[in-house]
Image (cartoon, rainbow, N blue to C red):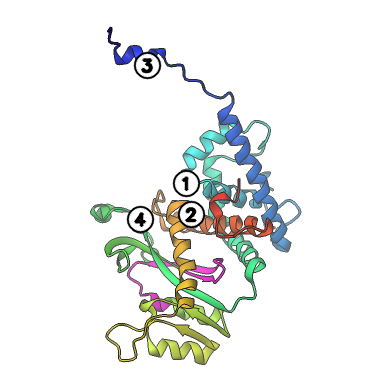
Amino acid sequence: MKKLRISQIFSKLVVTKPLGTKSVHMHNFITKFVKILDIFKKFAGNRVNELGNIPRPGVVPKFSDLEVIALSATAEAYGIDSENYLFKRLENEKGELLPNLITRRQYNQRRKLTARLGEEIRKDIANAMDGNEFVFSIDSKPVKVCQNVRAGRCAMGKDDFDHAPAWGYCSTMRMKYYGYKLHAVCGISGVIHSYDMTPANVHDIHYLKDIQWEYHDCMILGDKGYLNAKVQQNLFDVANITLEVPYRLNQKNWRPPGWAYKKFRKRIETLFSQFNDQFMMIRNYAKQPTGLFTRIAAKVSALTVLQYVNFINHRKIGQVKYALI
């Protein structure tokens, strides 16, 4: 029997490629961008003018502020965390669908300027889904800025020591890392209502100082990192907030947490897993703290918008990976 070489075998294979695959892909991206833009327009209210821009003097941008926010959220929803890749695809295949598309440099600059507007709209979207909840979960997750061996050479925050990263330890993952912490509070349905970023060496308890001014007459479920009798009493006295935290094994009154606590706590743990999986929070391309915070804000906005798409379509809001299908 005559043996064929590998090169001869592959030469006999005919690989066909569907026509217009890239165009269809980017057309679908732009279609979803328009859909997400409509959601931001719906909740923008009087924060922007009729052109979708924050009222300000100077030249009126043709690519509006709402479009910048929507483009950022759409890119994060598709898992595109590289601005270079995003604009290479858009510039080559946008055609007449995005005639006023700005440059990558302008997009990067304006995304930082519109981050506050995006967060205000995001909160309104979150309240539209579960604004009447009175039980919340609180937790934090590590946000690495580089590998540990490169921490000494990391230039992030060298010009802004107040917002510079720091060394921290994650007891859940049992790892030491260099970066920040993402603190978040979500409802029992899985919608993030508030969040913040701190250096990694800031203890979780300190975020509760901000909580007492944003929430009242509710119950917050935390893990053992929030166990502090003085803080729990202060939250109850100031804002009537009941902070439920499981006891440690070496405490006298230890008892296993109930099923309701485990079920509701799983909501925020699932959200953090989605941030790492679909929204690529484990990767970081930012060079400065402002850029990193802007990217984190875009990821949270994208998550909330996808949840809202499921909400209005009467689907489970937690299945954000299938929201744009």
Q: Which of marks 4 and 1 is nearer the N terminus?
A: 1
Q: Is mark 1 on a helix, strand or loop?
A: loop
Q: Which of marks 4 and 3 is nearer the N terminus?
A: 3
Tell me how far mark 1 sits from mark 3, CA to CA: 35 Å
In the image, what residue type sits under mark 4? Answer: Val
The answer to which of 138 and 37 lies nearer the viewer is 138
The quarter of the displayed image where residue 198 is located:
bottom left
Determine if residue 53 is in view.
Answer: no
Circle 4 residue: 145
Q: Which of marks 3 and 2 is nearer the N terminus?
A: 3
Circle 1 residue: 81
Q: Sort mark 3 into few (<14), some (14-19) or many (20+) by Cα contacts within 10 Å.
A: few
Q: Sort mark 4 into few (<14), some (14-19) or many (20+) by Cα contacts within 10 Å.
A: many
The answer to which of 325 and 114 lies nearer the viewer is 325
Q: What element carries label 2?
A: helix
Circle 3 residue: 10
Q: Are marks 4 and 1 in contact (CB under 8 Å)?
A: no
- Highlighted range, magenta: 184-206
In the image, what residue type sits under mark 3? Answer: Phe
In the image, what residue type sits under mark 2? Answer: Arg
Q: What element carries label 3?
A: helix
